Amino acid sequence: MIIKRGLNFSRLIKEASKLIHGRQYIDHFWYLKSNPESLQPLIDNETKIKNLFFEQPQIKEIFNDYYQVSYGRKDGRTHDIPEFYDEYEYNGRFAYFDTGNDYQIIERSLKGSEKEIVLDLKKIQFLKQYHATMKLTKLKISDDHKLIAFGIDLLNNEDIVWLMKYIDDDRVFRTKLFDCFDAAFTKDNMHLVYTQYDDKFRPYRLMLHKLGTTQEEDELLFEETDEQFYLDLQQTKDGKYFVLLSQTKQSNEVILIDREDPKNIQLLFSRKENAINLVHHHEEHGFYILTNKNSYDYKVLKQEGDKFVDFYCPQQGEVLQEVDLFHKHLVLYFTKESESFIKVISLQDKEIYNLFIPPSLVYTNHQKNKKNILRNIYDKLIKKDQSQYFLNKKVQNEVLGATIEPGVNHNYKSDLFQFHLSTPLVYDQVYQYNLSNKQLSKLQDANLTGKPFKREEFTCTRYYASSKDGTEIPITLVHHKALQKNKQNKLLLHSYGAYGVPQEIPFNIVYLNALEKGWTLAYAHIRGGNERGQDWHRQAIQENKIKSIEDLIGCASYLIAEGYTNPSLLCGLGASAGATTLGAAINIRPDLWKCAILLSPFLDVLGSLLDENLPLTKSDYLEFGNPNDKQIFDTIMSYSPYENLKNQVYPAIYISAGTGDFRAPLWNVLKYTEKLKQIAVKSKKVETFGDHPLIIDINDGGHYGGAGAQSVIEERTRYMTFLDYYVGLGNKESTKQNLTQDNDESIQLAGEKDKIQKQ
């Protein structure tokens, strides 16, 4: 049977025409946003195309190989490492619903006693219908350890409901808190304070709930009326205060709330200071503040009387990401050129040192060496050349790309703290450091089951590319040690470059198989992130947003020029706002790329920012600018992926999108794909299964994909299958062959009438 690229439903192309800043702005596909019913035929059509693509025998074989190996490499742990909450040890035990969705059973024990179950989601009647999609977002414990409150994302779309229950049995309070983003118990264990979000998913109210009453009876404590600001509820580790942050990405207001009297609210820092302030309270020393006020990057202030004075200012290039306060020490988490490290400061004698994590410890299997205890080695003894280490044009190190994240570390007076370490080649290790005797120990390796991965054959390397304005952009490569610069390497280049968020270099089970299949993974640390601090972010926002795109193009060009790959083997991946960057780059330089993977992409930048009724528009003005300003309008118009689609040859494009995504809504994606088909398909520049395919993978999830580890593996396997099919073998013959199917199952594919015959 013949498959045609034409319309399988009738509609009129309507135009939305506006006069903006003296120029005519026309959006041919505006109706996809204003009329949700118009989406369903497109969803059905694109789903049929995607399914047909993955049903091809050769593609199915690639998919099955990826999936079987990747899914077989399960986390071999049965539980996570316990965390102390006062006298109790709490931990999670890994479990599965009948649907296959994974979750954790929360347990606890007193020292020397039997474990008891704190929370088993499977036993809660209200949640049974949501087992396939739901996930636990947060869990809070009352001070007397008799109650818990926990948030559940029922449909994996960030619409969260909170439940409360007794720990000693399965009794759940009848009242549920809807539209609740975060919550915490007051000192009396009888109330919850919680942040409530509006119809745009913006946390804007702080409410007080008395256990046993209805949500309608809850009392309003604070309301944020400025739509650029959202609320974030925190609690100091000494348990004295709630800290309410009303914030944007550029400034915040800090409000203190007494946990004994939550109606006692006082302003600590005003938003007029135009700075970000994060608060930690010490019962003896007062407040420690993480701030960027009057500083090129974050520093630590200490309260002295009624003033705040500098306590610790990082060295140039050190980016302070997080602070953890203990009774006798301050633990600081840094990055420098995207490399994570920890500093410890004694609050008694002001001693400062780096906590060094030896590569030999990272690469020692915990199960084979259960002690894994090393004395801490001072930074000055083991990294005398640290400044040179980060300035080399090429940096190669077995632990390059490590991500370090703090554990829960609830016990404020403890001398022990835990942190997690992972790299692209090492999955989630848990370490414990003793602040008194300076001993570092590895508590847990996430040992993977299934096919052994020969980690010793691979490494991470750092290089620097030049952007259009001459700025050097770091690139991290993960690759086989035998990599040759012969232009014959399949290479997947990741990028983000927005909101001051650094480009992650995560561990990815599916990527292990990709590395084994000869892929090189590259991560471009472009401007717009915070790899080099706040200025790195500020250099690529608003009227300078184009710099992120130029950086990415510079990185791609460098990798080709240096012989790491060539345009027929180079692919790009961008997610969310990272897809804005990649989407713009393939408009400007489509010749650089063989494939582009756009995950939950933000593509209609201008149209979205012109609509103030959308959830993120006003907060996004700080990143992209307000198009009501003519200069900003012209700037966004010059790079927005949707506005700049052209009648040209595009790389193979794979897009994933969720029906429950409010951050990058489905209409945003389908406007882009429909316009691409209209512009490029008619001139045979985009084909369904030819050399330049367009596949849209639509799921029922939200912005962050499907629920559960299995769904994540399936999603990543699909796009790696797509890449391997179009890049791995060249497919010069198979991609030119066409597909047919029975007459009854023919599909009309939008915009193209070319006949595609069966492969």
Image (cartoon, grey):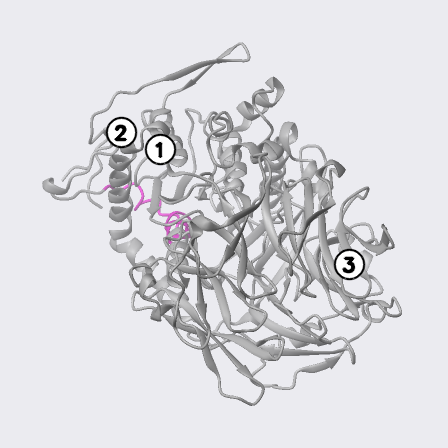
Residue placed most toward the observer, 52 or 415: 415
Q: Name the residue under label 3.
A: 389
Of 514 and 22, the residue lying toward us: 22
Q: Quadrant of the N terminus?
A: top left
Q: Vertical placement of 191 versus 546: above or below? A: below
SS of the residue at dot 3? helix
| Separation of residues labelled 2 and 3 (CA atoms) | 54 Å
- Dot 1 or dot 2, earlier in sequence: 1
Q: Tell me which corner region of the image, top left, top right, bottom left or bottom right, holds residue 419.
A: bottom right
Please state the horizontal and vertical placement of residue 389, each as a whole percent of the image: 77, 58
Q: Earlier in the sequence, mark 3 or mark 1?
A: 3
Q: Which of marks 2 and 3 is nearer the N terminus?
A: 3
Q: Where is residue 214 in the image (x, y as percent from the top left)?
A: 42, 54
The correct choice, above or below, for 24 with respect to 293 in the image is above
As drawn, is 15 to the left or to the right of 139?
A: left
User: How far separated are the C-alphas under marks 3 and 1?
Assistant: 46 Å
Q: Nearer the viewer, residue 5 or 137?
A: 137
- Mark 2: which secondary structure? loop
Amino acid, disc 3: Tyr
The disc labelled 2 sits on which kind of residue?
Glu
Residue drawn at (64%, 50%) of the image: 244
Give the side of residue 679 with respect to residue 322, left or right. left
- Where is residue 29 drawn, in percent x and y? 36, 25
Which residue is label 2 attached to? Answer: 752
Q: Is 76 within the magenta? A: no
Extreme top residue here?
22
Whether residues under marks 2 and 3 lie with C-beta atoms below 8 angstroms apart, the answer is: no
Provide the residue designation for mark 1: 686
> In this picture, which residue range is highlighted in magenta?
721-738
